[in-house]
Amino acid sequence: MPDRVPIIVTLASLEGGAVTLSPEGEIGYHEAPAFRNAIREAYDKRPKRLIVDLSKVGYMGTPGVATLVEALQISKKSGVPLVLCGMNDRVRGVFEIAQLHKVFKMTPDLAGALVA
């Protein structure tokens, strides 16, 4: 079995107080804790909006989706809008099967997420 590649998560502040979180790689059971920590770190910055750019995520399993559901709960409690963007068809399909595309604010790209 090949070794798993650790997830890389880049955190950046944008003009207007938005923060982007850009994970890179697959988000499964082993990667979800690092992803969860990055989301918490992003919320600790007290952004006006948190954007999770999933354009570099090739696959997301149930633990990754669960982590984003937790992020949505934090978003609702804190009043900080959460926007997901850049999903490929495979990742978007996971959200559609679970009917989560109706719950999350999702845009095709970062530009759309800044105004959503």
Image (cartoon, rainbow, N blue to C red):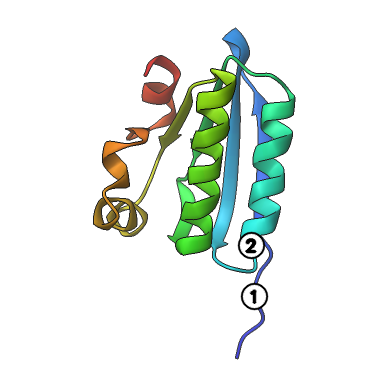
Choose the circle earlier in sequence order: 2 or 1. 1
Which quadrant is the C terminus positioned in? Answer: top left
Q: Where is residue 114? Give x, y as percent.
A: 45, 19
Separation of residues labelled 2 and 1 (CA atoms): 9 Å
The quarter of the displayed image where residue 93 is located: bottom left
- Look at label 2 and name its amino acid: Glu
Which residue carries the number 2 mark? 31
Identified at 25% across, 57% down, the residue is 97
Question: Which residue, as the protein is rendered here, is positioned at the far bottom?
Answer: 1
Mark 2 or 1, closer to the camera: 2
Per the rendering, the mark at residue 4 is 1
Q: Quadrant of residue 107?
A: top left
Question: Can residue 50 be seen at all in this image of the molecule?
Answer: no
Q: Measured from the top left, where is residue 39 in percent x and y?
A: 64, 39
Please tell me whether residue 28 is drawn above or below residue 103 in the rendered image.
below
Tell me the kind of residue under disc 1.
Arg
Work out which quarter of the rendered image holds the N terminus and state it: bottom right
Tell me the SS state at disc 2.
loop
Residue 74 x/y as whole percent: 58, 32
**Residue 20, numbered label:** none
Q: Residue placed at 69% from the left, 19% from the top?
A: 46
In this view, the residue farthest toward the top is 16
